[in-house]
Image (cartoon, helix red, strand yellow):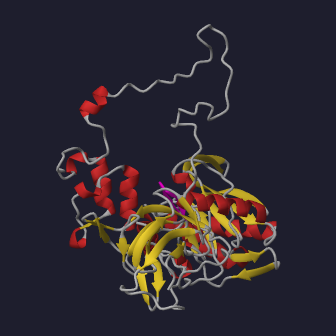
Amino acid sequence: MSQTKTFHLPDLGEGLPDATIVEWFVKEGDTIRLDEPLVSMETAKAVVEVPSPVSGKVLRLAGKAGDVIATGAMLAEFEPDPALPQRAEGQDTGHHHGAPAKPAKASASDDGGELPVQPAPSEARGGDAGTVVGAMQSSDAVHAERAIAVGGVKAMPAVRALARKLGVDLARVAPTGPEGTVTLADVKQAAADPSRLLPSRAGGTGVAQPTAAAAASAPAPAVHQRTPVSASGRPMRTRPPGADAGVAASGQPEQLKGVRRNMARVMADAHSKVVPTTLVDDADLHAWIGKQDITARLVRAIVAACKAVPALNAWFDGEALSVTRHPHVDVGIAVDTDDGLFVPALRNADMLDARGIRAGIDRLRAQVEDRSIPASELSGYTISLSNFGMFAGRYATPVVVPPCVAIVGAGRLSHDVVAVMGGIEVHRRLPISLTFDHRAATGGEAARFLRALLDDMALPN
């Protein structure tokens, strides 16, 4: 066995090109055992716990929290200890270091029916063993993401990442999860109400803050005020961003990470590969009886339109110039988070009633929020929905992410004056935008699809 062993960052899910360090569970000089937690990494899909590939002394770590590490690059270096358990030579670890496959097509959206705009279907409906985010295969076992104790605090990697982002000291958060595990809700409540924090040995609020004495003795930071004229009254010369090296706050470049980093790649790829065309119209909801779930109705209307015009419920291969039309309807329902946009797949929407659609959307949203959603659920949908109108906007040109052919956007609900039988009435109407890849569908097919969707939305219930 060699004196040192270099561990390269494995592919943490569907060919993603890099990942961001969230937290190291060891430091240089520590001894770690085979398959013990080494580091938690944030990808475009989840926060993943990476286990150690060897038992021995940690010689070198690739970076610090917040650093982006490319897939296949050095993550850590070890000095294996022959006296401790080691993985047999040639034994499969489930780690893949080959050239990244096509980037996973993941993207955006909101909650129970509100704000998807970026699809991400992959080329298979199932997961990929060894590369599924949230699970690392090691020999014959799978090490799923789990709560681990670090510094006496038991928490999931995603919870630690949130605590770091909000500046909350996990050691002072009262755990409410099973077996004394700190949950996402615990961290959010502690950040919103510091009085909930447990007392520390040294006192304090649990959020990193300077002491009163230190604050009083520290020199006041220089205040940089922008002004159009100099002290002499002459116009100031403008300077490029970053000219003031000492000012590290606003106006400085910030590297995209995790979900937003992947979204930027996906959008650029979509822009270069799709020939988008958008049709817009309004769904008249005047005949609706009672209160109804708008998102569930939108999903049902999409299913009806897919059955009427299968050409838009399809995937298009621009290189082979081939179209795959799907007999089932998997709708990408996006979820908007502080970390970026996700688009989980609502599977078999054509077989669900309104209650099943709502339950599925709620489940997907909950899994996205706690970052427990499997990578396989963030790809493979056949068409997508962006309900951006819950925030603002009437019409849009939502992005079609290949291999999908179409995406439906729903704008802000409004009350409009419409002409009816020589008179006027006020109707509730929902703006609808349909963007499709014109290489795979004709304008007539898209118009008939939109007509079928509008007709279903106009039904009383």
Foreground residue among 34 and 51 = 34
Query: Which residue occupies 26% across, 47% down?
Result: 193
Magenta range: 335-342
Residue 205 screen position, x and y as percent = 24, 45
Residue furthest to the front in view is: 3
Left or right: 310 as drawn, with respect to 217: right
Residue 153 screen position, x and y as percent = 26, 64
Query: Which residue occupies 57% across, 54% down?
Result: 256
Foreground residue among 298 and 313 = 313
Left or right: 287 as drawn, with respect to 243: left
Tell whether position 340 is magenta.
yes
The image shows residue 87, relative to residue 198, as above or below, that is: below
The image shows residue 224, relative to residue 136, as above or below, that is: above
Residue 320 visible here? yes
Quadrant of the rendered image containing residue 71? bottom right
Foreground residue among 134 and 66 = 66
Residue furthest to the top in view is: 232
Quadrant of the rendered image containing residue 329? bottom right
The image shows residue 378, relative to residue 23, as above or below, that is: below
> How many numbered discs?
0
Residue 175 screen position, x and y as percent = 23, 63
Residue 133 screen position, x and y as percent = 50, 75
Residue 460 visible here? no
Tell whether position 350 is magenta.
no
Left or right: 362 as drawn, with respect to 198: right
Q: Main secondary structure of the magenta part?
A: strand
